[in-house]
Amino acid sequence: MITAIFLISIFTTALTLSSIWPGLIPVWIVFAQLFGVVVVLLFFGLMVPFYKRTDSNNRFFGYLTRNLSFTLNHFILRLKVIPKGLENIPKDGKVVFFANHKSYTDPFVVLQMVQRNVAYAVKKGVYKLPLIGLWLQAMHCFMVDRDNNRDTVRRLMQAIKTVEKGQSMLIFPEGGTKDRDNDLIENMKHGAFKVAIKSKATIIPIRIVGNAKIRQRVPFYHTDREVIFLNPIPYESYKEMTTQEISQIVLQNINEAS
């Protein structure tokens, strides 16, 4: 649906403007793409009130989020997302994904692939963006305010409740985009694993490959990204461990994946 809205907006705008000023066709093509993005954002803004009134696991809104991610990756960022290990994702139940984080495009490549509703941890600044912030709230995303620990703890409790209700959560335990030229993880924030522990969720590590290419190629050159969903780590196997021990296991699994 989102892809169709985006493409229709581009083609109708480009054809209309190029027929009026045919000598500026290249300019109108670029303008049409920007207009298509605006139309998609406005559509999502109109859908927010309906999303807030429904359950966070509503399949239709999960579909919209996946379709938006596909549109952004394929048509705007020119990313080809290659998934591996999709069979490791449970169709239901409590799940928390933990992934390496080297690019701002990481949430979208994961959201495109997971066939269930996913909220994710996002820093406070993103919430201030027009329309996008409203959609993140409707998704029940976990807002992280690095300057206000008390507020982060309160929102952590909300994130735990979100997972307990059956909506999966995506967390980047590095605490930001670290060492973008290297896909490997060096350190993790141990506290990031509290969401999984407190909600008694299954942990699924994710290895995202190809981040080093993003800055040099996107959006002018086609770029491949691999998203590897690793073997699940059930709650029963880590419930007696500390957050530091869990983080070391997840770090090792991600770094050794291929």
Image (cartoon, rainbow, N blue to C red):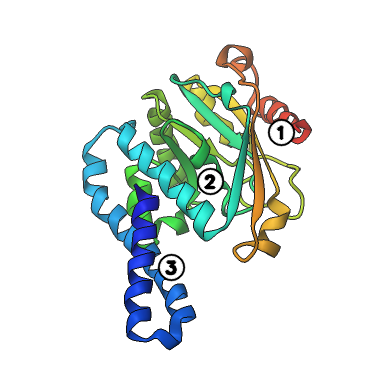
Q: Assign a secondary structure to mark 2.
A: helix
Which disc number belongs to residue 107? Answer: 2
| Label 1, residues with CA under 10 Å away: few <14, some 14-19, many ≥20 | many
**Type of amino acid at the residue the image marks with label 2:** Pro
Q: Which residue is mark 1?
A: 254
- Closer to us: 154 or 211: 211
Q: Which residue is mark 3?
A: 33
Callout 1–callout 3 Cβ contact below 8 Å: no
Task: Please identify the quadrant where the C terminus is shown.
Answer: top right
At 38% from the left and 65% from the top, the residue drawn is 10
Q: Earlier in the sequence, mark 1 or mark 2?
A: 2
**Type of amino acid at the residue the image marks with label 1:** Ile
Q: Assign a secondary structure to mark 3.
A: helix
Which disc number belongs to residue 149? Answer: none
At 48% from the left and 41% from the top, the residue drawn is 120
Q: Position of residue 52 (x, y in %)?
A: 25, 42
- Closer to us: 159 or 62: 62
Viewer can see residue 1: yes
Q: Assign a secondary structure to mark 1.
A: helix
Viewer can see residue 147: no
| Label 2, residues with CA under 10 Å away: few <14, some 14-19, many ≥20 | many
At 59% from the left and 34% from the top, the residue drawn is 98
Q: How many marks do you count on the picture?
A: 3
Which marked residue is nearer to the observer: mark 1 or mark 3? 3
At 65% from the left and 23% from the top, the residue drawn is 242
